[in-house]
Amino acid sequence: MIGKKRIHELAKEWDVPAKDVLAKIERLGIRNKKSQSSLTDDQIARVREALGLRDKASVTIGTERVVAERVVTSKDSSEDQLVTAREQVVENRVGTNVIRRRTQRVEVIKREEIPPAPLPDVAPSFAPVEMPVIESSSVEWDESVEAGIAEPKPMLPDVAEIEEEFLNASAAAGAE
């Protein structure tokens, strides 16, 4: 394996705090070890097993495997036919973290003509709906209500009034 390796290097390699590794070493009965101490191959194997660490699974790049198989019915784009075929979904590992998934048509099971859509014989007819007649009501208009409503006063003064006041004020100032 490695020979001898320091405890702090093993902890870093295993992504475990050095204190946890030292505690496991003490529980295993290996005495007087510090973070800078070295362990033999046998001791490393015992500590690794006690910590529950396993070797990382190796990923083989370039392998293909069939993930799923299914039967699909679709309309053929070039012809007016329904095509029933068997498809496979295949995964290909391109990199350590890249998986490419492809769908492949394996076998055409059957082809059949699409029946023309039946045209409706008669357009639907709608019966006319009779609207209820509203007769004029017997309520008479009261003119007194309308007489009580006055014209609203303008919020802003009339422009002509403002101009007249300005001209009067400037004439009075010019006369002095």
Image (cartoon, helix red, strand yellow):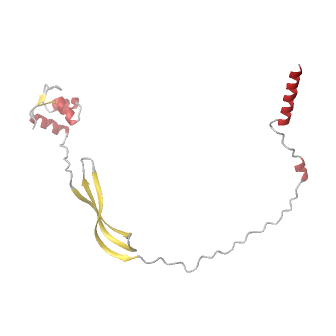
Q: Is residue 13 visible?
A: yes
x then y, percent, for residue 12? 21, 33
- Which corner quadrant holds the N terminus? top left
Task: Identify the image quadrant of the C terminus.
Answer: top right
Task: Provide residue 72's location: percent of width, then percent of height.
Answer: 34, 68
- In the image, 163 versus 83, the foreground residue is 163
Of residues 11 and 157, the one drawn nearer to the viewer in this rendering: 157
Q: Nearer the viewer, residue 27 or 161?
A: 161
40 or 102, which is in the foreground?
Answer: 102
Name the outermost residue toward the top: 176
Res 9 → quadrant? top left
Q: Quadrant of residue 23?
A: top left
What residue occupies the far front of the structure in this picture?
A: 174
Q: Is residue 158 visible?
A: no
Residue shown at the point (88%, 50%) measured from the top left? 146
Q: Is residue 49 left or right of residue 107?
A: left
Q: Position of residue 16 (x, y in %)?
A: 23, 34
* Residue at left offset 43%, top offset 78%: 115
At which x and y percent is residue 26? Answer: 16, 29
Indicate the quadrant where residue 48 lies.
top left
Point 34% across, 71% down: residue: 84
Q: Residue at x 87, y 22 (%)?
A: 174
| In the image: residue 159, left or right of residue 129 | right
Up the image or down, 9 lies above or below 89; here it is: above
Q: How many marks?
A: 0
